[in-house]
Image (cartoon, rainbow, N blue to C red):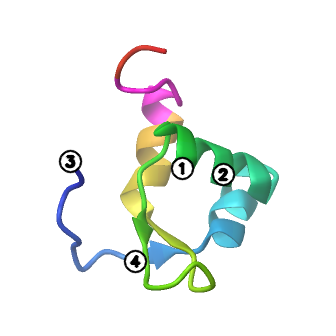
Amino acid sequence: MMATMTDEPLLTIPEVAQRLRLNPETVRRWLHDGRMRGYRIGSTRAGWRIPESEIRRVLTEGTTRPDGA
């Protein structure tokens, strides 16, 4: 279950990829795999938004899925 949205900044996939120095496809894959949490905004075209705190979590905890896979 996903947490409720907060007032923290929400970033796009390209913004997250730039901050983590990753390919945007890697960020998309992590979102689909559950390794990174984010919100789908409206249509497919609108894309994902990732809370800034999720970047900090990934950097400190790593990117393993919650089920340990």
65 is within the stretch colored magenta:
yes
Magenta stretch bounds: 60-66
Q: Position of residue 46 (x, y in %)?
A: 56, 85
Q: Mark 2 or mark 4, which has the lower sequence index? A: 4
Within 10 Å of the Cα at label 3, are there few (<14), some (14-19), or many (20+) other Cα atoms?
few
15 or 38: nearer the viewer:
38
Q: Is residue 44 above or below residue 30?
A: below
Amino acid, disc 1: Leu
C-alpha span from label 3 to label 1? 14 Å
Q: Mark 1 or mark 4, which has the lower sequence index? A: 4
C-alpha span from label 2 to label 4? 17 Å
Contact (CB < 8 A) between labels 2 and 1?
yes
Magenta stretch secondary structure, dominant: loop
Q: Mark 3 or mark 4, which has the lower sequence index? A: 3
Q: Describe residue 9's horizontal placement relative to residue 21 as left or right.
A: left
Residue at far right of view: 23
Mark seen at residue 31: 1
For numbered disc 4, what is the local secondary structure? loop
Return the residue at label 3: 1
